[in-house]
Image (cartoon, helix red, strand yellow):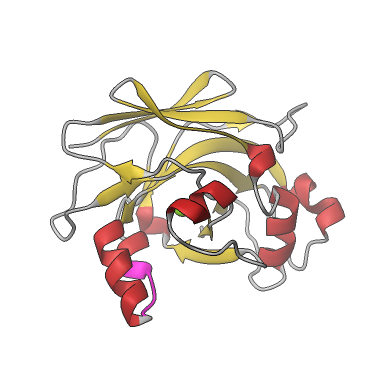
Amino acid sequence: MKIFCVGKNYAAHAKEMNSAVPTSPLIFMKPSTALLPHAKPFFYPDFSNNIHYELELVVKINRHGKSIKKSNALSFIDEISLGIDFTARDIQQECKKKGYPWEIAKSFDYSASIGAFISIDSIDLQNLNFSLLKNQSEVQRANTSDMIFDVATIIEYVSHRFTLQKGDLIYTGTPEGVGPVQKGDHLEGFLSGNKLLDCPIK
Ligand code: MG
């Protein structure tokens, strides 16, 4: 199982990171060992002092696929959820400064929290409201219509380069409002008003 992530897929988030909006999908990966199962706590790692949450719509690939056309891409998804792309922002900034890869900031153990999955029957993936509460205060809110690259475009782009396999996950990027977590915080993710994600920070 592979985890793909899209960077800077919402213009307002690119702006808050002082980054340009990408002209093609910005893709990075996390290993399967990064997955933090539904409702399990995230243990703050000792190698960072600035772990950020990034709430993202996550789609699950339902079968083997290679060079998938955009027009057929959504048939490769049956289920979606919300996830948190936990990011060691202090380490990411060091990596960026040096021009180094991001893995140690993005792909460490349990850096990919995942919520409960729901069926996409009769759901328009590009018109979904989602939001994140931290300690019961809303810190992120967005609609998937604000994605720069929609889900079908992402699947076409990724599958042209990497064979997709059943169970692969794609984290489709975070909207604005990213910020730090601390031990004792409680994160809850909502999709169309339904709570799908629960992640205490310990
Ligand atoms: Mg992200």
In the rendered structure, which segment of residues is drawn in magenta? 100-104
Q: Is residue 106 above or below residue 51?
A: below
Q: Residue furthest right?
A: 71
Q: Measured along the vertical axis of the image, is residue 81 above or below residue 171?
A: above
Is residue 190 visible in the rendered image? The answer is: yes
Residue 93 location, quadrant: bottom left
Residue at image location 77% in from the left, 26% down from the top: 122
Pick the quarter of the image with the C terminus. top left
Identify the residue shown where x is 64% and y is 38%: 144
Q: Position of residue 72 (x, y in %)?
A: 84, 52
Tell me: residue 32, above or below residue 43: below
- Residue lying at 69% horizontally and 49% vertically, measured from the top left: 151
* Horizontal side of residue 86 vs 201, given as left or right: right
Asked whether 154 or 96 is in front, the reply is 96
Q: Please tell me in which quadrant of the rendered image residue 158 appears.
A: bottom right
Say if 42 sits above or below 150 in the image: above
User: Quadrant of the rendered structure where residue 34 is?
Assistant: bottom left
Position of residue 201 measured from the top left corner of the image (x, y, whole percent)? 23, 36
Residue 135 part of the magenta-drawn span? no
Magenta segment main secondary structure: loop
